[in-house]
Image (spheres, helix red, strand yellow):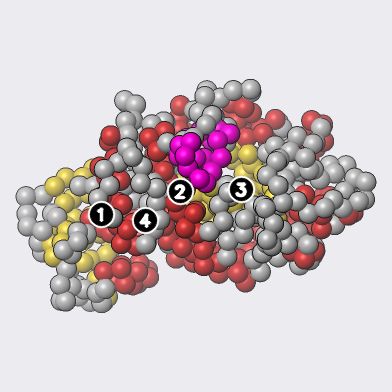
Amino acid sequence: MPVIPLPVQLSALPEGSYRLTDASRVRFEEAALEGVAAYLGELLSVPTSPDEGDIVLTLEGDEPEGYALRASENGIRIGGGSPAGVFYGVQTLRQLVQENRTVEAVEIADAPRYAYRGAMLDVARHFFGVDDVKRYLDDIALLKLNHLHLHLTDDQGWRLQIDAWPELTGIGASTRVGGGGGGFYTKDDYREIVAYAASSFVTIVPEIDMPGHTNAALASYAELNTDGIAPEPYEGIEVGFSSLDSNKPLTYDFVRDVLTELADLTPGPYLHIGGDESLATTDADFLLFVRRAAEIAASLGKTVIGWHEMGRSRELPPGTIGHYWNFSDPREGNGEHALSFVEQGGQLIISPGDRAYLDMKYDESTELGLVWADGPTPVPDSYEWDPALIVPGVGEEHILGVEAPLWTETVTTIDEIEFMAFPRLACVAELGWSPRTDAPRHFEEIAQRLARLGGLWDALGVQYYRAPEVEWGGT
């Protein structure tokens, strides 16, 4: 049965199929599941009830994100270790419902490989409004992803209201790659995104990228610059030219103010503080900045995340998470920098650019995307790798999870986001959820299931790339 991510155990049963009818009802056995039941009822266009129904949702089991699903001619039962587990069972059920509104008899026992299963959306290079982010949240929920990392700031734009520094959005939010204006989230906008994500059991992971990738901030406040002169707003795509001044006391007032307001808005446990491609920062200044900025973030009660370059520091707060973004075959010492997080008691999020970056071209003819990560990334490449084999010295127990970033130098609309994300994001989602295999993965293992999922994407209006390696059906 074609389900993505592939469940831990799936067995067809020798019973008749279940058919949805006008008499079908979703019953929730615990009040905590009322929201999940309402969600499923809306998807299936059936009523919900705490008292009766042949589609039963219940809390059971010890795995918080695990679930068990059983479908037969008499009904469907989904039990989970928490409301999140039941929700993931619902996502599986969505893929099992056939066009004639039947579900084949099946028994599934399932739980995720990794605790962190994420997508990242760059809203700094091009801005995407609240409704676009909500649509992407709907898209990733189908794949049982549970984190959305928002890259909120970069050279080209600052995208979040900060009361203590209003010109960050007065000036810093006015631009984007290629020109044409920018945009930003008010605090209420951000709260709306956080709440909407939580309804799908997705945690928002906000990133303020520092000390590099900061031209939008430097253009907003001259006093943040070493020479006291604000640069012009930036609309290009080159990186590595900007830096906060690691030796100015005002820099750390700025960092504390921004992160404090962000932490107050963010109920999730993580603050991502960037740290990548700080090519205009000396080694000494970079290490000074990382130590102080990470201390500030940790003092706010958050777990710090930073791109793997931050592993150059040996003074990170306990439990700091490294985010590996380079290649699937580590080079130029980047594996060593990533390993530093583990040696200091942290874990890693794995996002190899040549495998998991959704902004890479599919092939040379793809209009959107870039090719810096060793050329185009065809869909099979996004599946045929193992997160536990990327960084030497890092084992399964050292990996918090995986993430598929989508940078938006060339991406300007939600349809383009979806086109670049799917189907590759489905492949990465399977690596984050499904059990590790002893043998190398082969794309043929998922290709047929992608074709089936494409039918659901068509029904939902999700845009996706019809990879030639998949025998897609429909139009």
Which residue lies under the disc numbered 3? Answer: 409
Residue at 62 percent across and 44 percent down: it is 305
Question: Which residue occupies the foreground of this view, 177 or 258?
Answer: 177
Per the image, label 1 sits on a secondary structure element best described as loop
Write the start and end of the magenta stretch as one range: 352-373
Q: Nearer the viewer, mark 3 or mark 2?
A: 3
Left/right placement of residue 329 relative to residue 63 reads right
User: What's the distance in space between the residues labelled 2 and 4, CA to CA?
Assistant: 13 Å
Percent across and percent down for residue 180 are 68, 61
Q: Which mark is residue 301?
A: none
User: What's the distance in space between the residues labelled 3 and 1, CA to CA?
Assistant: 31 Å
Percent across and percent down for residue 186 are 66, 69
10 Å neighbourhood of mark 3: few (<14), some, or many (≥20)? many
Which residue lies under the disc numbered 4? Answer: 142
Residue 354 falls inside the magenta stretch: yes
Q: Nearer the viewer, mark 4 or mark 1?
A: 1
Are the residues at dot 1 and dot 2 in contact (C-beta closer than 8 Å)? no
Per the image, label 2 sits on a secondary structure element best described as helix
Are the residues at dot 3 and dot 2 in contact (C-beta closer than 8 Å)? no
Q: Is residue 451 above or below residue 95?
A: above
User: What's the distance in space between the residues labelled 4 and 3, CA to CA?
Assistant: 26 Å
Percent across and percent down for residue 424 are 41, 43
Percent across and percent down for residue 115 are 45, 45
